[in-house]
Image: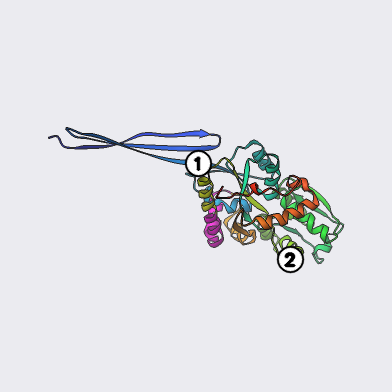
Amino acid sequence: MKKTLSMILILALSIVFLGCTTTTTTTTATTTTSENTSDTTTTTTEQVVHSIIVPNGGPALAQMYLQNNTEKYDVTVVNGPDPLVAAFGSSTYDYIFAGTNLGAKFYAANPEYLLVAIFTLGNTFILTETDDTFDLSYLDGKEIVVYGLNSTPDIVLKYVLEQNNIDCTLTYVDSVATATSYFIADPTKIILTAEPSLSVLLQSHPNLDIIDLQDEYATLSGGASYPQAGVFAKASLSNEEINDFLVDLAASIQLVNTSVEASAALGESLQFGFSATVLASAIPNNNLVYLSALDAKSSIEAYFTIIANINPVLIGGALPVDGFYYDPSR
């Protein structure tokens, strides 16, 4: 009788592009042959690579461990809100990290993306250098360089100023980086900024005067924070895909918050444009959290009610319907 021969053959390794979602299929076939029998076993494993667009800064920090997992995620890091607007309009990406109100506005027009999670409860600061007392009253009659017209930082700034009867001239620029450049050119400028840019400026200007807008908002809201930004998933994705993503996102945020030095080093290696020293300083000020869409619903509605009183167009005309919030039991 002939001896049994076993051969393991790699028959196929293919990558198929469907939109921006890549599916990698690996098929392994094992054939066993004897004098009287022939048996073939085929095992197929699929790995879907999901596409993500995320703005640099705090949002990029929140997802850095996803970005580092290139077998599962293809991440594009951008500056400013314009690429996010384009992403919602084109439906190019599986997941979009964006301001909560921006996602609500696009959902009202076309419910293609669902809010699946909140990842930050505010990361917005006003700064300058002055010999005077720097508080909200100092801002009256002054110019503030503001990034992101109608973005969450802009909305919170306007709300705080209005509630405190502060009249300012707001000059808009496209991104935090551009606002930062205004201050670098003239440190007497008052700018709206966020981490990690704030930590960059503190390295060269350790005596910065800073107003924390999270504190000012909490004073007005009775201690509540505002859900600044969230993650939006294509409604066509399966619950299994979204839930798997949410597990990875929650783990990433936890690692960033608990392993600051290691995360800062990873952020530098991912070329976010900031040194590990700056990122280590910035991470604690980013207020990174993980909240499911349903868990954050009440705080989102409270925040959106404020926006609706300012300009309801910024959230699509009215508070979002329940379908806006991803429900794992759908």
Question: For the residue carrying disc 1, how many other residues have a C-alpha within 10 Å: few (<14), some (14-19), or many (20+)?
Answer: many
Task: Name the residue type under label 2.
Answer: Gly
Query: What secondary structure do most residues of the magenta stretch adopt?
Result: helix
Residues marked 2 and 1 touching at CB (< 8 Å): no
Q: Position of residue 239 (x, y in %)?
A: 53, 46
Foreground residue, 129 or 33? 33
What number is the disc on residue 49?
Answer: 1
Image quarter for residue 208? Answer: bottom right
Foreground label between 2 and 1: 2
Q: Position of residue 245 (x, y in %)?
A: 53, 49
How many angstroms separate mark 2 from mark 1 (CA)? Answer: 43 Å
Task: Name the residue type under label 1.
Answer: Val
What number is the disc on residue 222?
Answer: 2
The answer to whether residue 172 is left or right of residue 275 is: right
Label 1: which secondary element: strand
Q: Which stretch is magenta?
A: 250-271
Label 2: which secondary element: loop
The answer to whether residue 29 is left or right of residue 314 is: left
- Residue in view at x 54 percent, y 47 percent: 242
Q: Earlier in the sequence, mark 2 or mark 1?
A: 1
- Residue in view at x 47 percent, y 37 percent: 23
Asked whether the viewer can see residue 83, the reply is yes
- Residue in view at x 63 percent, y 60 percent: 287
Foreground residue, 186 or 278? 278
The answer to whether residue 28 is left or right of residue 17 is: left
